[in-house]
Amino acid sequence: MKNLKKKSFKQYVLFSFGELILIIAGILIAMNINNWNENRISLNKANSYIAKIKKDLEIDTTYFNSAIKRIDLKIDYKKSLFNADSLAKFSTSNIQSLVTSGTNNISINDGTYKKMVESGIVTLPEKEFLFEKLNNYYSVFNNYLNEFNSWEAKSVDKDMDFWIYQNHYELEYIDATSSVTNKEENRKNLLNVVSSKEGKNYINMAILREERMKEIYTKARDGAKKLIRRIDSIQN
C-alpha cells in the first residue's frame, strides 16, 4: 500500500512536471510566433518605406540631372560674355539676366527617410547594411548641399551688389515695359562694366561657382543612383 502511494505520488509529480514543460513550451512557441509576426510586420513596413525612398531617389536624380544641364548652359552663356562677337548678339536684357543669374538651390528630399527613422524600424538586422548606406547618403549629402547652397546664396548676393546696386546702368530685364532714358547709352555703360577687369573677375568667379555646384550635384546624383542599384539588388 505504501509502495502504491509512493508510486502514485511519483506519477503525479512526473505528470505535473510534464504539464509544466508543455505550458512553458507553449509559451515559448507563442512568444516565437509573436516575435516572428512582429518581425514580419516590421519587415513589410521597412520594405514599404524603402520602395518610397527609391522613388524619392529617382526624383532627386531627375532634379540633379536638370540642374546639371541648366548649369552647363549658364556656364556656356557666361563664357560667351568674354567673346565680343557673341556679346554683340545678346540683347541688353539678356546680358543683364546672365550676369545676375540666381541660385540653383537644389536639396535632397529626405521626408520619407526621416519618417522611417522615426518609426524605429532602422534597427532591423535584416536591413542593417542598407540602412547604414541610406544614413550615410542622407546625412553626408544633406550637410554637403546645405553648406554649399548657403555659400552659393552669399556669392550671388555679392554679384547682385556689384551688378545691380552700383548704378552704372538701368535695368531692362525686370520689366519689358520699363522706360530707359537712353537705351544705347545704357547698353554702352553695361558693356563697359562687363568688359572691365572687375566685371570679368565677377563673371569668372560666377563660372567657378557654377562649376563647383555642378561637381557637388554630380556627386549627389551619382550617390542616389548607386543607392537605387543597391536597393534593387537587395530587394529583388
Image (spheres, grey):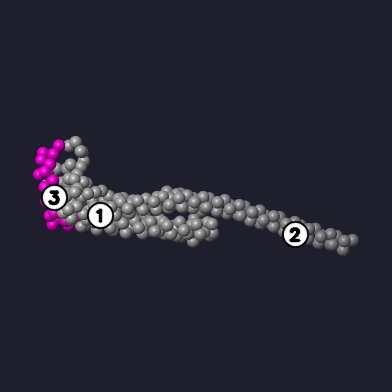
- Residue 205 — which label? none
What SS does tag 3 mark?
Answer: helix
Q: CA distance from mark 1 to mark 2?
A: 86 Å
Comparing labels 2 and 3, the label whose residue is closer to the camera: 3
The local crowd at label 2, few if under 14, some if 14 to 19, many if 20 or more residues have their Cα within 10 Å, is few
In the depicted view, which residue is nearer to us: 193 or 150?
A: 193
Asked if one can make out residue 120 in the rendered structure from this viewpoint, the answer is: no
* Residue 232 in view here: yes
Q: Which residues are magenta?
A: 179-203
Picture mark count: 3
Dot placed on the residue nearer the N-terminal end, 2 or 3 = 2
Which element carries disc 1, helix, strand or loop? helix
Tell me the residue at 17%/37% (across/down). Answer: 178
Q: Which mark is residue 17?
A: 2
Residue 55 at x, y percent in the picture:
45, 50
* Residue 99 x/y as whole percent: 20, 50
Inspect the image, locate mark 3, and give the three-letter code of the amino acid beneath it. Leu
Amino acid type, residue under disc 2 in the picture: Phe
* Residue where numbered disc 1 is placed: 76
Instruction: State how far apart marks 3 and 1 are (Cα).
Output: 18 Å
- The residue that mark 3 highlights is 191
Residue type pointed to by label 1: Asp
* Alpha-carbon span between mark 2 and mark 3: 100 Å
Please state if 11 lies on the left or on the right of 111 as rendered: right
Q: Residue at x 35, y 58 (%)?
A: 218
Give how far across and how far down residue 30 sits, in percent. 66, 53
Query: Looking at the rendering, in which quadrant would you find the N terminus?
Result: bottom right
Q: Is residue 158 left or right of residue 108?
A: left
> In the image, which is nearer the foreground, mark 1 or mark 2?
1
Q: Earlier in the sequence, mark 3 or mark 1?
A: 1
- Closer to the N terminus: mark 1 or mark 2? 2
Residue shown at 17% from the left, 45% from the top: 92
